[in-house]
């Protein structure tokens, strides 16, 4: 078994963070109390990659991070502190880059490449499309953007498209050598024309030797120049390749390979093939055998052809390892969806935990008032579900048109063989596919060669019925046919095989439809309360009773007791403490509406009409901006600090640009609207510029103080719950202190670790840190204390039973309490506040006032009563009777973490 899981610490490598950074952090991580470093992708990625998810070599550590030697030093340092390593691994896709040797081999040799089936390429297509041109192909050719170049270092002739290089099929190099004025000309033409991949390597070495001869090098340069001067010959050379260059806009509808979402630079990898799995996991398995790998996080598991089969292969590969690594998956669960226990993994990366917390901290009783406030500012009501449906249809039909065309072709192939379905036309089939995908309530189903799981059959049937009820397709038969395909409901072997092919790709695509439509579009359009616009979240689930949170935690014990408990990740839309602050808006929508009204009036001079009927910022974006401003300002922010205002203004400008482009209403990434964006940037700058808006920011900050205080208390509440909830706390880099980040890349800013190390070693108590709650030190102290408690009884907090505790009294609605128990008599009790704005009252105080709790108390069941508990936060022991008075929690704190002695 791997090291005991207590907590993970996520570190984002690249952009200044390398193996040496992580090596030096080992003592700090040990002091904090985490058990595992959770590393972002560290294998070689496309040049200039800022994230590592565009891996180009699964078996080579990124040189810029320190390479093999740097990794080993980091690994040894972590091991020396008894800290394990969990790696973020990307099996679904790779970066299409000249640095990717497998991809280069495919582009050079096509179907004859040893890696022809490594990638998910439609080989029945005429060419492998390379959509990188900044203009249509004909224009690029005419303007001289295309040429042949010589890579002297590798002795290879390549095709260049305005700086983007591609390999040439060695068998077509005769077209270039035909211009060569040298005795070797005919020999080179003849030998390369019939070369195999192995022979081509030998010929390349021979070419390298020739290049050392000045006469040959000069002759070859002249031949290349002649080729480049002959546009017809250059075009013929291009047409002879297995690939075809194209305008970048062509990708959405003509791409000939599966991609990650709508990113053509990330090509799908066929992990379902045994040799592909073996080649791509060789180093991961070696690291596990060497005890340098304790766990693996599988990125975008829903993109794989068969996630269950892949995870079984991975588990089987790890079985030969003495200390078998843990497996977690990036899996977004929606609504009532639960993790498939048949996958036999430790759990997910924890987005569903964020959703459960949102329900706990958002005031459901104020939903109507917030909806009215938002609609009043917009001047219209918005229907979230209609918006999601519209965007699903749009994303699938437009942004993912190539994927839809592929699926339509697969479906028509099966339909054409059936007498009852052969009359179904291309348009009807295409629209039916879109409607069924749009009706799915989950990211994907999991039908495969093993059959159709009952829960998936039910999901498919419900989606088919819903799609038919919407009447976008005039007849029911074509939608029923799509349902049959997805349930493999055929007798003929060819039809079953065709249905499997269709279903595999459909299931790989629906996650992209959901993510791009909801997370990357609607979550930037529907801005009622942006704290709810989170990965895996549902913005119309506006708060929930405490019982719902308890039910979610009980499910975690059943399904994934060792799943990660995330509150911030590299993919979350905002930092956990920004979200906590924004939750407090849900309790006072009328007060927030009045604040926004005043802000909007003062910012009116900077709101510009950029086109008839189009104002920048538009009302929905402006409402979002004010929430973003509230969420990003540090608790100890000083409005008179010009440098701080400037830095925050730059961050907000980047956030707003991304938000409106993702929303795709008035501008987008693929067609930026300069006038709209310029006006928006000026608006943001003015809000942070005292020279333009006077005391605007200072006045806003003064009005916001009750939300700031309530948000800070909510931050500590969710931190304490995270320490005691079923699962494993995952701490995103730097979030042991307040994290008020915006969406990426803002959440990948460098972390001041020396300051954090100093705080952890200063010896201040939590009570003392509370007096200076604005600097965030108290959150770090709480985190360290909670991890220490977890370390004393790890399995109690993962596999131990979850026991909801009853709360009575005047402020019962403001408390969540639960216990964790095991079969050995151990018990822990967690008590935390909720709905903190109304708990604290109208002032800006950080703690409930004296007498503020009234008679509120937590009732203990008999098995937990009459015991002596250790105070996990400040030390000491307390004897507990049948109830715990909120006014009498240890050290007068508004929360508690107790563990039986």
Image: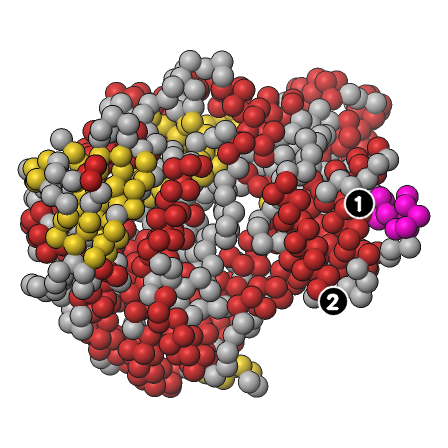
Examine the rendering and report whether any part of residue 547 can be seen.
yes
Instruction: Tell me residue 67's x, y (percent).
Output: 42, 26
Using the image as rendered, state which of residue 341 and residue 175 is in the foreground: 341
Q: Quadrant of residue 542?
A: bottom left
Quick check: 74 above or below 820?
above
Q: Which residues are magenta?
A: 412-422
Residue at left offset 52%, top offset 47%: 337
Residue 1 relative to residue 852: left or right: right
Using a 10 Å C-alpha cutoff, classify the residue at mark 2 as few (fewer than 14 neighbours), some (14 to 19) or many (20 or more): few
Query: 288 or 388, which is in the foreground?
Result: 388
Q: Residue 26 lies in magenta, yes or no? A: no
Tell me the mark number nearer the camera, choosing from 2 and 1.
Answer: 2
According to the image, label 2 marks what residue?
471
Relative to residue 855, is residue 310 depicted above or below?
A: above
Could you tell me residue 839's position as x and y percent?
Answer: 20, 65
Foreground residue, 19 or 192?
19
Q: Which residue is mark 1?
A: 410
- Left or right: 347 as drawn, with respect to 818: right
Verify whether residue 419 appears in magenta.
yes
């Amino acid at each position: 078994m791997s090291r005991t899981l207590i907590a993970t610490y996520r570190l984002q490598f690249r952009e200044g963070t390398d193996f040496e950074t992580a090596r030096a952090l080992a003592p700090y991580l040990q002091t904090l109390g985490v058990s595992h470093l959770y590393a972002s992708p560290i294998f070689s990625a496309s040049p200039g990659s800022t994230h590592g998810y565009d891996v180009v070599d699964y078996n080579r550590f990124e040189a810029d991070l320190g390479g093999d030697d740097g990794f080993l030093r980091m690994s040894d340092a972590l091991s020396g502190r008894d800290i394990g390593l969990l790696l973020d691994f990307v099996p679904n896709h790779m970066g299409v880059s000249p640095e990717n040797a497998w991809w280069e081999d495919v582009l050079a040799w096509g179907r004859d490449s040893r890696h022809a089936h490594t990638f998910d390429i439609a080989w029945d297509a005429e060419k492998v499309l390379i959509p990188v041109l900044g203009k249509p192909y004909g224009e690029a050719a005419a303007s001289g953007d295309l040429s042949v170049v010589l890579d002297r270092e590798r002795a290879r002739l390549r095709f260049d498209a305005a700086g983007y290089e591609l390999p040439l099929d060695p068998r077509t190099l005769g077209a270039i050598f035909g211009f060569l004025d040298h005795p070797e000309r005919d020999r080179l033409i003849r030998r390369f024309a019939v070369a195999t991949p192995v022979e081509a390597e030998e010929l390349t070495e021979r070419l390298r030797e020739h290049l050392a001869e000045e006469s040959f090098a000069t002759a070859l340069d002249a031949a290349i120049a002649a080729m480049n001067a002959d546009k017809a010959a250059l075009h013929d050379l291009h047409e002879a390749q297995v690939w075809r260059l194209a305008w970048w806009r062509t990708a959405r509808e003509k791409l000939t390979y599966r991609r990650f979402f709508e990113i053509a630079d990330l090509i799908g990898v066929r992990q379902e093939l045994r040799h592909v799995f073996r080649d791509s996991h060789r180093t991961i398995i070696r690291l596990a055998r060497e005890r340098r790998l304790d766990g693996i996080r599988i990125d975008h598991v829903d993109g794989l052809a068969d996630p269950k089969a892949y995870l079984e292969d991975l588990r089987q590969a790890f079985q030969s390892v003495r200390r078998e690594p843990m497996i977690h998956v990036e899996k977004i669960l929606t609504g009532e969806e639960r993790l498939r226990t048949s996958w036999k993994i430790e759990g997910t990366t924890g987005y569903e935990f964020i959703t459960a917390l949102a329900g706990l901290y958002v005031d459901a009783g104020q939903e109507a008032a917030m909806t009215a406030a938002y609609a009043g500012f917009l001047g219209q009501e918005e229907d979230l579900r209609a918006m999601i449906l519209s965007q699903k249809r749009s994303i699938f039909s437009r942004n993912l048109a190539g994927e839809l065309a592929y699926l339509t072709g697969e479906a028509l192939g099966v339909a054409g063989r059936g007498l009852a379905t052969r009359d179904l036309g291309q348009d009807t089939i295409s629209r039916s596919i879109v409607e069924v995908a749009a009706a799915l309530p989950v990211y994907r189903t999991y039908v495969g060669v093993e059959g159709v799981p009952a829960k998936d059959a039910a999901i498919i049937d419900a989606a088919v019925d819903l799609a038919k009820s919407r009447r976008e397709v005039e007849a029911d038969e074509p939608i029923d046919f799509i349902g049959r395909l997805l349930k493999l409901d055929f007798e003929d072997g060819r039809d079953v095989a065709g249905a499997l092919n269709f279903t595999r790709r459909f299931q790989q695509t629906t996650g992209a439809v959901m993510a791009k439509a909801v997370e990357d579009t609607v979550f930037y359009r529907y801005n009622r309360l942006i704290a709810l616009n989170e990965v895996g979240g549902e913005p119309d689930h506006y708060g929930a009773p405490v019982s719902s949170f308890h039910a979610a935690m009980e499910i975690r014990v059943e399904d994934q007791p060792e799943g990660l408990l995330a509150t911030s990740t590299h993919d979350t839309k905002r930092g956990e403490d920004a979200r906590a602050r924004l939750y407090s808006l849900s309790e006072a929508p009328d007060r927030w509406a009045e604040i926004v009204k005043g802000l909007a009036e003062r910012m009116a001079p900077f709101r510009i009409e950029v086109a008839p009927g189009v104002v920048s910022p538009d009302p929905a974006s402006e409402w979002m901006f004010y929430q973003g401003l509230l969420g990003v300002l540090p608790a100890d922010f000083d409005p008179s600090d010009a440098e701080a205002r400037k830095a925050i203004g730059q961050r907000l400008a980047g956030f707003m640009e991304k938000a409106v482009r993702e929303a795709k209403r008035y501008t987008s990434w693929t067609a930026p609207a300069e006038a709209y964006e310029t006006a928006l940037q000026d608006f943001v700058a003015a809000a942070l510029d005292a020279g333009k808006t006077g005391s605007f920011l200072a006045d806003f900050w003064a009005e916001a103080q009750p939300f700031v205080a309530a948000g800070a208390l909510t931050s500590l509440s969710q931190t304490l719950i995270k320490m005691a909830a079923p699962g494993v706390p995952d701490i995103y880099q730097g979030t042991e202190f307040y994290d008020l980040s915006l969406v990426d890349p803002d959440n990948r800013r460098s972390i001041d670790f020396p300051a954090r190390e100093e705080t952890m070693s200063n010896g201040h108590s939590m009570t003392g840190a509370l007096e200076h709650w604005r600097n965030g030190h108290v959150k770090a102290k709480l985190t360290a204390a909670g991890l220490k408690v977890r370390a004393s009884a790890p399995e109690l907090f993962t596999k131990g039973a979850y026991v909801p505790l009853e709360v009575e009294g005047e402020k019962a609605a403001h408390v969540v309490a639960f216990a964790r128990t095991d079969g050995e008599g151990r018990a822990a009790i967690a008590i935390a506040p909720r709905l903190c704005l109304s708990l604290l009252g109208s002032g800006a105080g950080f703690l409930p006032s004296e007498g503020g709790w009234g008679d509120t108390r937590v009732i203990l069941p008999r098995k937990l009563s009459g015991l002596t508990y250790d105070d996990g936060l400040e030390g000491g022991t307390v004897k507990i009777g049948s109830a715990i008075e909120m006014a009498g929690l240890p050290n007068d704190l508004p929360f508690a973490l107790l563990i039986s002695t």
